[in-house]
């Protein structure tokens, strides 16, 4: 079963629910192919959410040469592994981004989760409890290499946002990713962002064709939450280390990112996990042994 975007009344009900719950919404962002602009999309989505008065934590699984800090011209001196080893506090490991964005480099730390003993797990979960009252949305930017932990990160999150483009390899990779999550681990709902397309009709056509194929073979629901145009300004702002929403707020891409943020806040959340960010970390530790090492897109 697929759906394009829920009616306005249903969306308002979902948003009201989100605003009244004393929880943190956790969204893992993934894709089936390198080079689809996923990290750029995560950064601009985070910026758009902060314009809506949301405090955003970006958990970045990417290596330093391709991560969000590098995109912003920042340097992360410490990461999640320093926190796990008790060399630094979680607060010391966070990098201040633009607006109300905090960034946590986590590639090495996520890889180390399976080695923690019970007391180390409890200490790490307790560390994340400190963020409960200072974060509204967690966005997880997953890596695309063969050692990615997209599977445990996705299963620990309330929602999974899949970034597509119109290329065959992007669609094939996204399908393979959803097939593993749905058939092996019962993940049934995915948000879909169509990136780097010329127009909204093109994006809707890509989504419609993709969802028809998916519905034939997978027992999942797909929810279209927006598209981002293939705009030259996006490449330019990358060189400036700036989100396009800050640099060109009236651009087509900036408008699309703001709409994307609104649609995600309104989106349905059938896999509703109770609790805050510490519960996400608890789930992540529990699923950290799951591997996508053999996943190829």
Image (tube, rainbow, N blue to C red):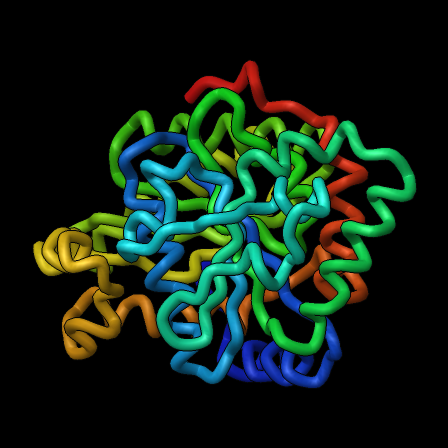
- Residue 150: horizontal and vertical position, in percent? 57, 36
* Residue at the outermost front position: 87
* Residue at the outermost right position: 118
Quarter occupied by residue 212? top left
Q: How many marks?
A: 0
Q: Residue at x 8, y 55 (%)?
A: 232
Q: Is residue 181 above or below residue 97?
A: above
Q: Residue at x 14, y 53 (%)?
A: 239
Residue 204 at least partly seen: no
- Residue 50: horizontal and vertical position, in percent? 43, 77
> Which of the two residues, 3 or 242, is positioned nearer the viewer here?
242
Residue 11 at least partly seen: yes
* Residue at the outermost top position: 294
- Residue 285: horizontal and vertical position, in percent? 77, 40
Q: Residue at x 70, y 85 (%)?
A: 20
Q: Is residue 214 above or below residue 58?
A: above
> Which of the two residues, 135 or 118, is positioned nearer the viewer here?
118
Q: Residue at x 53, y 53 (%)?
A: 104
Q: Is residue 162 above or below residue 133?
A: above
> Which of the two residues, 262 or 147, is positioned nearer the viewer here?
147
- Residue 71: horizontal and vertical position, in percent? 29, 51
Horizontal side of 174 relative to 22 (left or right) equals left
The quadrant in which the C terminus is found is top left
Horizontal side of 146 relative to 241 (left or right) equals right
Horizontal side of 268 relative to 297 (left or right) equals right
């Amino acid at each position: 079963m697929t759906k394009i975007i829920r009616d306005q009344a249903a969306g308002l009900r979902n948003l009201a629910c989100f605003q009244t719950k004393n929880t943190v919404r956790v969204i893992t962002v993934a894709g089936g192919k390198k080079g689809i602009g996923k990290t750029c999309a995560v950064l601009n989505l985070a910026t758009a959410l902060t314009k809506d008065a949301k405090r955003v934590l970006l958990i970045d699984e990417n290596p330093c040469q391709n991560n969000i800090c590098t995109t912003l011209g920042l340097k992360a001196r410490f990461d999640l592994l320093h926190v796990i080893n008790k060399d630094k506090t979680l607060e010391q490991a966070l990098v201040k981004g633009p607006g109300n964005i905090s960034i946590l480099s986590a590639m090495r730390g996520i890889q180390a989760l399976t080695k923690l003993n019970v007391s180390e797990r409890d200490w790490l979960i307790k560390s994340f409890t400190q963020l409960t009252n200072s974060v509204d949305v967690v966005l997880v930017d997953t890596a695309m290499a063969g050692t990615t932990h997209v599977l445990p990160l996705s299963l620990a999150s309330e929602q999974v946002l899949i970034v597509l483009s119109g290329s065959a390899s992007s669609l094939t990779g996204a399908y393979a990713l959803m097939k593993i999550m749905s058939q092996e681990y019962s993940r049934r709902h995915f948000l879909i962002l169509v990136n780097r397309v010329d127009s909204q009709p093109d994006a809707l056509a890509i989504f419609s064709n993709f969802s028809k194929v998916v519905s034939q073979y997978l027992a999942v629901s797909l929810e279209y939450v927006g598209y981002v145009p293939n705009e030259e300004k996006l490449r330019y702002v990358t060189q400036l280390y700036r989100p396009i929403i800050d640099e060109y707020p009236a651009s087509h891409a900036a408008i699309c990112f703001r709409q994307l943020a609104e649609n995600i806040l309104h989106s349905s959340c059938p896999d509703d996990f109770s609790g805050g960010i510490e519960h996400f970390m608890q789930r992540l530790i529990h699923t950290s042994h799951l591997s996508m090492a053999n996943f190829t897109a």
